[in-house]
Amino acid sequence: MATSTTTALRAAPRWIADRPRLTDVALGGGLTLFDAVTVLNHTPAPDGWGVALWAAQTVPLLWRRRWPHAVLAAMTALYLLFQVLDPIPGKIPGPYLLMLGVYAVARYGPRRAALPATALCLGAVTMGDALTGHWQVPQLGSLEPISTTTFVFFFALAWILGSGRRRIGADADRLRELNRRLRAEQELNARQAVAGERARIARDLHDVVAHHVSAIAVQARAAEDVLTDDPVLAVQGVGLIARTADTALIEMRRILGLLSTRERDLAPEPSLAHLDRLADAARAAGCRVAVTVQLPETGVQFAGLEVSGYRIVQEALTNVLKHAGPVDVRVAVRADAGQLLIEVENDPPAPDHRPAPGHWPVPGSGRGLIGMRERAAAFDGTLDAGPRADGGWRLRATLDARVVAA
């Protein structure tokens, strides 16, 4: 019970702040009703029009937020009218109602016009008191009797409170706007991060698919060549194609699993310690692969660098399978002076070699090289690839580990 009451009390200010029109109606209507009741108890009993004129001084407060200067002007006019007509003998309006209009001007009106409007109201009521004979000689250090000193004090208090509340409201609006911009920026950064991660996953997916599909194409061609002469060997090739396809599907599912929000048991991220997997896949397709790795005992220490190095080797072997077929391949990976050096060389294809049939990316499109160059450039590295004099192909990549460390 106590908890619900406390929660309701904490929520009440926000509930009220979200309904400004209701607040204005409660303030203006409540004060008008209160003024009418208090004047009715005046002795002698006042006339009805006098009560109405007295109570009407707070009616303009219903529009204090929308037209604060008009509200102050209307309240000032009603104050002066009551002074001139004097419908209730002995009842003299003080500054207490007008200060609500001054507060509204300082709080909601244009900043430059707030102080002049307050000064004009003060001058008008002072002159009205003087003309109607209600003006009193100010007494230094006292607010009584009601005089110019009293009005100056209460008007100044109302103006200071209204101006201070304006500044607080402006600061709150500014903070809300900054918070909105911050949330928008965070959402944008999150979307960009998701887009970047999806692009990285797409590149990895391309590497996996292209590598295994190229291996399948080479294996299928080899099975086709021996199908008539050696059916047993052809059957073995078909089985190898099936296993390669299964491996491709498994890796694709692992990569696509990163796009799902569900938790999965994923295999460790590829690194330079897993180059044997690539070499075995290329050997299964008929290539004779020699791998030399010279790295510190602690490795290269940066997972992103290892993944990029692994993918470069994978794409290079994929290109060998697509364009050269089953040939001798040499892969060398070493670390030197803070740099990761990768070199992949292959011998020229056999004279009767048929390139892999067109698939995305089509042979010769250069998209594989573009992806490798992007991976190298991400670590301030370089990548050079081109034919050798004997018709083979050489690829050299340099990735700077010191960029990651910095």
Image: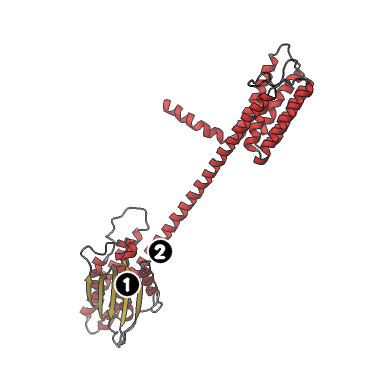
Quarter of the image that includes the N terminus: top left
**Quarter of the image where one finds residue 108:** top right
**Quarter of the image where one finds residue 20:** top right
Circle 1 SS class: strand
In the shown orientation, is residue 65 left or right of residue 174?
right
In the shown orientation, is residue 280 left or right of residue 33?
left
Q: Position of residue 318 (x, y in %)?
A: 32, 74
The residue lying at 68 percent from left, 18 percent from top is: 145
Q: Position of residue 218 (x, y in %)?
A: 29, 78
How many numbered discs? 2
Q: Nearer the viewer, residue 384 or 197?
A: 384
In the shown orientation, is residue 78 left or right of residue 7?
right
Residue denoted by label 1: 398
Q: Which mark is residue 358?
A: none
Mark 2 Cα-neighbour bin, 10 Å: few <14, some 14–19, many ≥20: few
Labelled pair 2, 1 in contact (Cβ < 8 Å): no
Give amino acid for label 1: Thr
Q: Nearer the viewer, residue 403 or 367?
A: 403
Q: Position of residue 303 (x, y in %)?
A: 30, 61
Q: Nearer the viewer, residue 167 or 34?
A: 167
Give amino acid for label 2: Ala
Q: Position of residue 209 (x, y in %)?
A: 34, 69
Residue denoted by label 2: 199
The residue lying at 49 percent from left, 51 percent from top is: 184
